[in-house]
Image: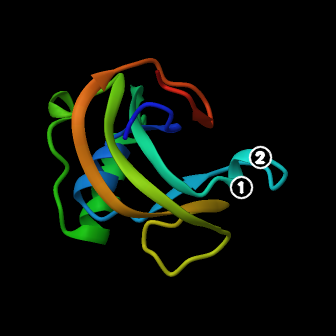
């Protein structure tokens, strides 16, 4: 089910890492009072049009954590829905190598979906 689901915009290559490389935490710097921190359940992953500006540092970190090389930047879809995950909890510390804080959405059951273009927004949003 896609219609009626919330989406979360994530920059590439983080969206790819969530869906294909076992990234189990999505870090956010949201304030504790942010209502989005109460969200639990399935949500869509939106690949943002904006890429992570720290690409080389990011590549080195990913290699250290997972042993994986990132795919070429131009091969990663942007500007639309690319997958779905379940948000099971919010943590403020974690043993996951992906956690950098200050808070993290714990992600489970990642699954890739066919690309569907749509505009992203901050926080959880209605994509369609």
The residue under the point 34% across, 54% down is 18
Quadrant hosting residue 54: top left
Say which element carries label 2. helix
Q: In this view, does 46 lie to the left or right of 13?
A: right
Task: Please rate how many residues cluster around mark 1, counting C-alpha atoms within 10 Å: few if below 14, some from 14 to 19, many from 20.
Answer: few
Residue 65, how many percent across, how many down? 31, 70
- According to the picture, the residue beneath numbered tag 2 turns out to be 35
Its colouring scheme is rainbow
Above/below status of 31 relative to 74:
below
Viewer-proximal residue among 38 and 11? 38
How far apart marks 2 and 1 lie (CA) works out to: 6 Å
Residue 69, how many percent across, how many down? 16, 55
Viewer-proximal residue among 66 and 46? 46
- According to the picture, the residue beneath numbered tag 1 turns out to be 38
Quadrant hosting residue 105: bottom right
Task: Please rate how many residues cluster around mark 2, counting C-alpha atoms within 10 Å: few if below 14, some from 14 to 19, many from 20.
Answer: few
Q: In this view, does 86 lie to the left or right of 89?
A: left
Quick check: marks 2 and 1 in contact, CB under 8 Å? yes
Quadrant hosting residue 113: top left
Residue 74, how many percent across, how many down? 18, 27
Above/below status of 77 relative to 97:
above
- Residue 29: assigned label: none
Q: Residue furthest right?
A: 33
The residue under the point 17% across, 62% down is 68
Say which element carries label 1. helix
Q: Is residue 74 left or right of residue 110?
A: left
The residue under the point 46% across, 21% down is 128
The residue under the point 44% across, 66% down is 98
């Amino acid at each position: 089910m896609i219609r009626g689901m919330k989406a979360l915009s994530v920059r590439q290559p983080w969206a790819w890492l969530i869906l294909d490389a076992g990234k189990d935490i999505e870090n956010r710097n949201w304030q504790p009072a942010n209502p989005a921190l109460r969200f639990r359940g399935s949500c869509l992953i939106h690949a943002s049009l904006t890429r992570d500006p720290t690409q080389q540092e990011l590549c080195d970190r990913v290699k250290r954590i997972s042993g994986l090389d990132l795919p070429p930047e131009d091969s990663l879809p942007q500007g639309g829905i690319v997958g779905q995950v379940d948000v099971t909890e919010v943590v403020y510390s974690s043993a996951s190598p992906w956690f950098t804080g200050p808070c993290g959405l714990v992600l489970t059951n990642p699954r890739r979906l066919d690309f569907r273009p749509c505009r992203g927004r901050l926080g959880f949003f209605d994509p369609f």
